[in-house]
Amino acid sequence: MTDKIIVHGIEYLIKRTERSSLGITVERDGTVTINAPLRANLKAIERFVSSKTIWIRQKLAYKSQTNREKVRRDFVSGQGFLYLGKSYRLRLINNGTGVVDQKGISTSLRLHNGYFELLEREKERGKDHFIKWYRKQTEQQLQLRIPRYTNRIGVEVKDFRILDLGNRWASCGKKGTLNFSWRTVMAPIQVFDYILVHEMAHMIEKSHSKNFWRLVSRVISDYEEQKTWLQMHGVELNI
Ligand SMILES: [Zn+2]
C-alpha cells in the first residue's frame, strides 16, 4: 500500500514493505520515496524525513539541474512562453497594421486572448521583445505588491531595479534598493511574492539566520513550498 505525505513542502510516497528500517530514495524524475516497515507509524516517518530535509533538497536541486535539458525556446508559432506560472502559446502575426497593447500603444509583442502575439517581421528580435515585455510586467507587479508588504515587514523599499541577474532571482542593494531579475515574473505569483518578501526581509536581517526565516514565515507561512518550487523549476524560468 502507498501513502503520500508532505513535509516542508516536499511530497513523499510511502512504500511499506517487510523491512526493519526507514530509507529514502530520490528517483530520477524527482519523486521521493520512503521505504518503510509495514508497521512504521506516520509520526516516526515524518520525524525521520524532517531530519533529512536538507539532504533531500540538495538531491532534488541537483537532479532538476542535471536532468532537465537546457531551456531553449524558439520564436515560432506554438512555442509556449511563461507568465506568472502559466504557459501561453506564441502566435506569429502577419498583418500590415501591427498590434496594440492594452493602452492602445502599438507594440511588437502582446499577450492577447491567451496567446502571445509577436509580429512575424520581428521574430528575429523575439528574445529582445520578450525580455522587454517581462521587464515591464516585473515592474508592474513590484509596484503593485511592494506596498502590500511594507507595513507587514516594517521596511521601506526606496527604489527597485530590474536587471539580468543571471541565475539569481533578486538581491538587496544599498539604501533600500532592491534588484530583481526579469525572469521572476515567469514564476507563479506565490513564488514571486516569496522572492519579494525574502529580499525585503534581508533589509532587516542580512544573513539567512533563524530570525530571518521567522520573519519570512510570519508573512508567507508556506514559504518552504515556494522555496522548493524554485529549486525544482527555477531552471525553466528562462527564454
Ligand atoms: Zn537570501
Image (tube, helix red, strand yellow):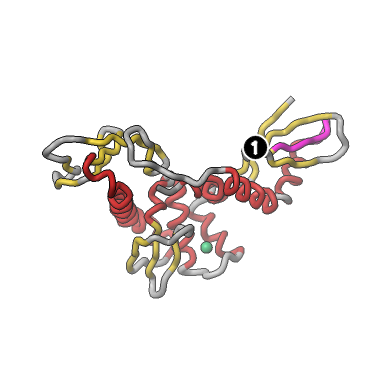
Q: Quadrant of residue 5?
A: top right
Q: In which quarter of the view is residue 197 placed? A: bottom left
Q: Is residue 176 left or right of residue 96?
A: right
**Front residue (pair 191, 112):** 112
Whether residue 144 appears in this view of the structure is no
Residue sitting at 33 percent across and 67 percent down? Answer: 159
Q: Is residue 130 in view?
A: yes
Please name the residue shown 52% across and 69% down the image: 205
Q: Which stretch did the figure color magenta?
A: 33-40
Above-or-below relation of 150 to 144: below
Q: Residue at x 74, y 25 (%)?
A: 1
Write down the residue under mark 1.
31
Q: Position of residue 177 (x, y in %)?
A: 37, 69
- Specify whether residue 39 is painted magenta: yes
Residue farthest to the bottom?
A: 175
Instruction: Name the magenta segment's main secondary structure.
Output: strand
Percent x, y of residue 212: 55, 64
Which amino acid type is marked by label 1? Answer: Thr
Q: Is residue 62 magenta?
A: no
The residue lying at 43 percent from left, 46 percent from top is 187
In the orientation shown, which residue stands out farthest toward the left? 97
Who is closer to the viewer here, 176 or 228? 228
- Asked if 179 appears above or below 190 in the picture, the reply is below
Q: Is residue 224 left or right of residue 236?
A: right
Total marks in image: 1
